[in-house]
Amino acid sequence: MKPFKLARIAAEAESLRLRGMFVRIVTRGVLALVALMFVMGTVVFVHIGAWHWIRISAEQTFLMTTAILGGADLLVAIVLGLLASRSGPSRIEREALEIRSKALQGMGSALSLTQIVVPILQLLIGMRRRPRP
C-alpha cells in the first residue's frame, strides 16, 4: 500500500476511535451528573430528617421513613457512580485503534529509505537536465 493511503486509513481509524471515546466520555458525564443529583437528594432528605427530628424529637416513624428514602437515593447514586467509573472503550474504539496501529506499522515499513531517496534523486536529476529558458 502507498504511504499516503496508509496515513489516510490511520487518520480515519483515529477519527473513529476519537468519536467513540467522545460518546463514552459524554455517557460517563451524564451518569455522573445523575449520580450527583441523587447525592444532592440524599443530602436534602438527611437535612429534612434532621430538621424534623429536632422539631419533633420523639417521632421515630418519620425519621425512619426519611432514612429509608435517603438510603435508597444513596444506593442509586452509588450504583450510577460505579457504572460511570466502569465504562471502558467500546468494541468499535478497540477495533479502530487496532486498525490505526496496523496502518501506522505498514506505513513505517513502506517508508523505507530507498522509497524516500529515489524519488528525490529523480526529481533533482530531472531538474538538472531541464534546459533553462
Image (tube, rainbow, N blue to C red):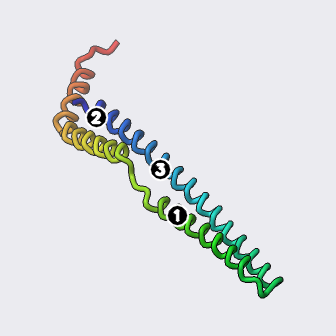
Q: Label 2: how many residues lie within 10 Å, few (<14), some (14-19) or many (20+)?
A: many
Residue denoted by label 1: 81
Vertical placement of 58 versus 130: above or below? below
Q: Position of residue 126 (x, y in %)?
A: 23, 21
Residue flagged by tag 2: what amino acid is it?
A: Leu
Residue flagged by tag 3: what amino acid is it?
A: Arg
Residue flagged by tag 1: what amino acid is it?
A: Gly
* Circle number at residue 6: 2
Give the label, 1 or 3, closer to the camera.
Answer: 1
Q: CA distance from mark 1 to mark 3?
A: 14 Å
Vertical placement of 80 versus 90: above or below? below
For the N terminus, which image quadrant? top left
Q: Nearer the viewer, residue 111 or 8?
A: 8
Q: Position of residue 130 (x, y in %)?
A: 26, 16
Q: Nearer the viewer, residue 18 or 83?
A: 83
Residue denoted by label 3: 24
Q: CA distance from mark 3 to mark 2?
A: 27 Å
Labels 1 & 3 near each other (Cβ < 8 A)? no
- Which of the marked residues, 1 or 3, is nearer the chain's N terminus? 3
Q: Label 1: how many residues lie within 10 Å, few (<14), some (14-19) or many (20+)?
A: some
Vertical placement of 95 versus 53: above or below? above
Q: Residue at x 34, y 42 (%)?
A: 96
Circle 2 SS class: helix
